[in-house]
Amino acid sequence: MNPESEVQSAALPELQVKRILVPVDFSPSSRKALSYAVAFARQFSAELLLLNVVEIVPPPPELIIPDTELLDRSLHEVAEKRLAEWHQTVAPKVAARAEVRTGSPYREIVQAAAESNIDLIIVGSHDRKALTRVFLGSTAERVVRHAPCPVMIVREREHDFLQEDESQPKPPTIAA
């Protein structure tokens, strides 16, 4: 028997995607990943979870910041406001919720996926040079290695298979 005919005749399992996690850092690659996530959510009638992780990096000792807690709260509030704006652009199209966490981005993404029983993570990836990735690491790469579910990586510059719906609002462009 021909192996190709065995594959063709085998019944394919139906995909069950009910919850999609979209980590966003407000970059163009995040915006593109969100577009893909909305398309998938519409296709599968899935719920989106938009997640932003505020990474608190301790200041160097020579930099004196009187109230680091106030700074951390301020960063969290700014993230909540920006994420709410992105959430408003997708809420009319699909069921969605938004959450801001504080910590290591890849760890918080993986933990959120596990806690929310996520079926698919769609994450944008920055087009960095290999040497930069070696020193800084890649959140997307770490998520792929540790996620409890499949991960789709959307690169900023690649062939798109999405058809743009011009009648739908796009996430706001916010200068960083």
Image (cartoon, rainbow, N blue to C red):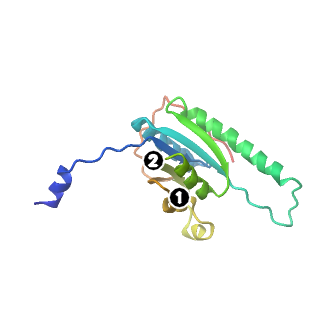
Which residue is painted at 40% across and 37% down in the image?
43
Which residue is tagged 2? 119
Give SS at disc 2.
Answer: loop
Q: What residue is shown at x 49% (from left), y 63% (from top)?
A: 145
Secondary structure under tag 1 reads helix
Q: Mark 2 or mark 1, which is nearer to you?
A: 2
| The one of 113 and 129 positioned closer to us in this rendering | 113
Amino acid type, label 1: Val
Residue placed under numbered mark 1 in the picture: 143
70 w.r.t. 168: above or below? below
Q: Residues within 10 Å of mark 2 (few under 14, many from 20)?
A: some
> Of the residues shown, which amino acid type is indicated by label 2?
Asp
Q: Is residue 21 left or right of residue 79?
A: left
Between discs 2 and 1, the one toward the N terminus: 2
Q: Which residue occupies the foreground of this view, 76 or 163? A: 76
User: Marks 2/1: CA distance?
Assistant: 14 Å
Q: In the displayed structure, would residue 44 be above or below residue 155?
A: above
Identity of the residue drawn at 86% across and 62% down: 63
The percent coordinates of residue 69 (x first, y second) are: 81, 51
